[in-house]
Image (cartoon, rainbow, N blue to C red):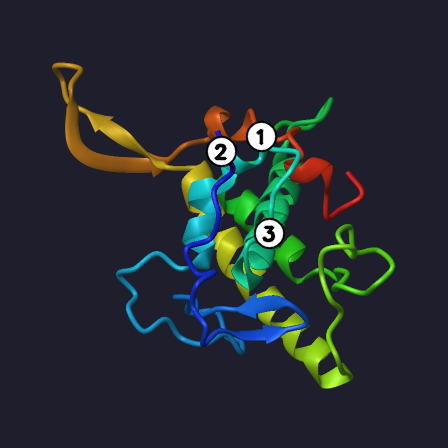
Amino acid sequence: MPAYHSSYNDDPSVRQVGNTAILPISTKVRGPAPIASDPSQPDIIEEALDLFRANCLFRNFEIKGPADRLLIYLILFISECLTKLAPTPGRPSPGYQEATKVLQTLAVDSFALPGDAGFPLNSLYHAPGSRPDADALRSYLTQTRTELALRLADRLYPPEQTMGPDGQPTGQTGARAAKPSKWWMSFQKRRFMGRSLGSA
């Protein structure tokens, strides 16, 4: 079974920095990203979240366009987020509010860009062509990382079903889950393409 690719690869109008796509996203987070013209359609962040668990099983991935480079980056960032929330001896996984803070901090932390010594996929990415391009890419990735962190926290801690007196779901939702979804956290140690954005 082949890995899944971004549906945005075929859009010829997409702006690129280096050879990474700068795609529209639906977000209230401030930043330079183009606004999605149709918020009802999944953006690249939704695509990364939907494809994460399938794609992170693959050690090889054939890049078919600039949107795939952004997809790869976001999938690797999801892995970094899961690693940050994983329990360690003496420290359980955080609840929803704390996890949201942890991931928001991670999203805006200093990170390497293509061309920097610490970037894990320099053989597949072109560095930005100028300092203004590098600043624009950093701002864009910070915005997408922040929006992704918010959406990931919502998926990791879904609202729990409210049960009626008969033990059946009422169709209403209650408080968010106290622990992150085990279905997501079971992928925490998998490394898409054998790579990691962080030191973990």
Q: Nearer the viewer, residue 18 or 178?
A: 18
Q: Are marks 1 and 2 in contact (CB under 8 Å)?
A: yes
Q: Please tell me whether residue 119 is drawn above or below residue 155 in the rendered image.
A: below
Q: Which residue bears the numbered disc 1?
A: 57
Residue under the point 50% across and 31% down: 184
Mark 3 → mark 1, Cα distance in angstroms: 16 Å
Percent of width and height locating residue 75: 57, 46
Q: Which residue bears the numbered disc 3?
A: 63
Residue 195 visible in rendering: yes
Q: Nearer the viewer, residue 92 or 196?
A: 196
Under mark 3, the amino acid is Ile
Quick one: label 2, few (<14), some, or many (20+) residues within 10 Å? Answer: some
Q: Please tell me whether residue 91 is drawn above or below residue 67 in the rendered image.
A: above
Quick one: label 1, few (<14), some, or many (20+) residues within 10 Å? Answer: some
Element type at marker 2? helix
Q: Is residue 58 left or right of residue 127?
A: left
Percent of width and height locating residue 105: 65, 56
Under mark 2, the amino acid is Ala
Residue under the point 59% across and 51% down: 63
Under mark 1, the amino acid is Leu
Q: Are marks 3 and 1 in contact (CB under 8 Å)?
A: no
Q: Earlier in the sequence, mark 3 or mark 1?
A: 1
**Count of numbered circles on the image:** 3
Mark 3 → mark 2, Cα distance in angstroms: 16 Å
Front disc: 3 or 2? 3
Q: Please tell me whether residue 62 is drawn above or below residue 192 in the rendered image.
A: below
Percent of width and height locating residue 195: 73, 41
**Disc on res. 54:** 2
Percent of width and height locating residue 56: 58, 35
Q: Is residue 166 left or right of residue 42?
A: left
Residue 179 visible in rendering: no
